[in-house]
Image: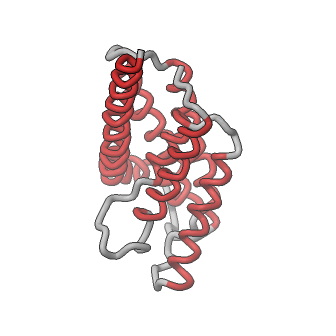
Amino acid sequence: MIKLSPKAQLAVGLALVALMAMTRGQHFASLNLPSASWAVFFLAGVLLAPRWVFPALFVEASLLDFVAIEWQGVSSYCVSPAYWMLVPAYGSLYLGGRMYARLHRDHLSSLPLLAGLVILSAFVCYLFSGGGFLFFSGRYPDPNLAQLAERIGTYYPRYLGNLALYVGTAAVMFVGLRAWNAQRQGACS
């Protein structure tokens, strides 16, 4: 199980909030990074203990979308009754992260488990977000499962790739910081 000190959780939480703010929408035009929103919810589930983190991150994402639409000229096409499907979508990522945190062991054998939970929770997330938009947005006159399958083939790989990029980077940083901390503590003994 992954347990971080309250100080480390605060630092991670602030970093995740900043990462979502920098990569969601057009908030920082000079940065051309893929959206980290999915990774933020997954990593919050892995690394942050307080349960209020999930609703706080959802509020942040919603406020960022509102600001982008109202003041930055971003299209409101994606805002529809289906927007609320993002709650179970992001929830699946967060819960996938929580599950990984409970099963994690500081050993390379945890990597396949991490990869499997990233893939599974991302797929469930896409079913809620992409499927929710297809069936509940009102933008498609006759939505069907064949369209959903086509959209999964088109969009899911990119979303999974972005998620894997950020989670992989976080995993490398986590291992590096753990090794550095262990070495530092060993030198002080």
Closer to the camera, 51 or 13? 13
The reply to whether residue 141 is in sight is yes
- Residue 150 is left or right of residue 49, and the answer is left
Rendered location of residue 104, percent (x, y): 47, 20
Residue 129 drawn above or below residue 187? below
The C terminus lies in quadrant: top left
- Residue 126 is left or right of residue 102, and the answer is left
Residue at 56% from the left image edge and 61% from the top image edge: 61
- Residue 101 is left or right of residue 146, and the answer is right
Residue 170 drawn above or below residue 179? below
- Residue 6 is left or right of residue 169, and the answer is right
Closer to the camera, 73 or 83? 73
- Considering every residue shown, the one lying at the far right of the view is 52
Q: In the figure, residue 84 lies in which quadrant? A: bottom right
Rendered location of residue 127, percent (x, y): 50, 45
Residue at 34% from the left image edge and 14% from the top image edge: 109
> How is colour applied across the structure in the image?
secondary structure
Q: In the figure, residue 4 lies in which quadrant? A: top right
Residue at 61% from the left image edge and 46% from the top image edge: 88
The reply to whether residue 92 is in sight is no
Rendered location of residue 157, percent (x, y): 31, 46
Residue 141 drawn above or below residue 39? below
